[in-house]
Image (cartoon, helix red, strand yellow):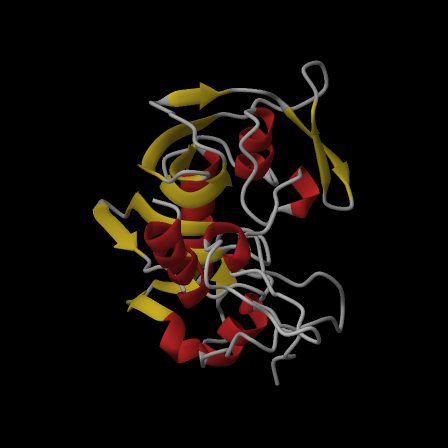
Amino acid sequence: MIPQEQNHFKYPKFQDLIIHEDDNLIVINKPPFIPSLDAREGGEVNILRLAKKYHPDAQVCHRLDKDTSGILLIAKNPETYRLMSIEFEKRRVDKIYHAIIDGTHVFENLLVDLPILNQGNKNVTIDRYNGKPSETIFNSLKFFKHYTLVECKPITGRMHQIRIHLATQHAAIVGDSMYRGKPVYLSQIKKRGYTLSKDQQEQPIMKRFALHSKSVKFVLDGKEYSFEAEYPKDFATLLKQLEKFDA
């Protein structure tokens, strides 16, 4: 049973997450609040465990942060896992993420190439001397008064890469407290006609950071694959509210 640590989010069955399946691959639209892999022995439910219950030989080909939603590739056999690992290592997998960021920012093929050092325990930092080469390309997609919808294309695949690279541009992802991103409250953008009773505490529109793995393209055994994942409800709701009250 999946723990309901985020009681506002209803977890679907693994089968309902599947975008595509063939003899070698399962492609899912990962919901937020579920880790990709085991964090520790006997720990919380994660995508790998759910996938193995569905198909015993399943292996997750890459990972998304627990709060990140979107496209996740799962191999159904060791050979496919090996081939996909090579594709990721050779940087031949084109990944596109969408993020909602604090502030209005005009990014036109902005390349951020600041080296990232993994300090362990999910802590990373920009380190020009000891960090590993890290590259992300950013393009603004939609502007609001106080926020921007951004396309993020990571060339490399470092931990927290998109999140920390955006933070260096003073454009932290909404709700990403680790990198000083602030949540969005309806009272902030809908300044008129919004009231709470004295015993109510306002909740943010989105209870995680606003990052979604939107699409992926790659070649496997000479065949081209391209997949796209719809926004989950919380991401879509935040965009709808911004379009309505912060346009």
Q: Is residue 100 left or right of residue 119?
A: left
Q: Is residue 41 left or right of residue 183?
A: right
Question: Which quarter of the picture shows residue 16?
Answer: bottom left
Residue located farthest toward the front when viewing the structure as drawn:
192
How many marks on residues?
0
> What percent of the width, then of the height, locates residue 176?
61, 46
Q: Residue at x 71, y 14 (%)?
A: 129
Residue located farthest toward the top when viewing the structure as drawn:
129
Image quarter of the N terminus: bottom right
> What percent of the width, then of the height, locates residue 243?
33, 51
Q: Residue at x 40, y 29 (%)?
A: 138
Residue 126 in view (yes/no): yes
> What percent of the width, then of the height, locates residue 61?
48, 53
Question: Which quarter of the picture shows residue 165?
Answer: top right
Residue 79 in view (yes/no): no
Of 23 and 242, which appears nearest the observer? 242
4 above or below 245?
below
234 above or below 139?
below
Q: Is residue 74 left or right of residue 22?
A: right
199 above or below 235?
below
Image quarter of the C terminus: top left
Residue located farthest toward the bottom when viewing the structure as drawn:
1
> What percent of the width, then of the height, locates residue 140?
35, 32
Of 218 and 151, which appears nearest the observer? 151
Q: Residue at x 40, y 34 (%)?
A: 153
Residue located farthest toward the left when viewing the structure as drawn:
223
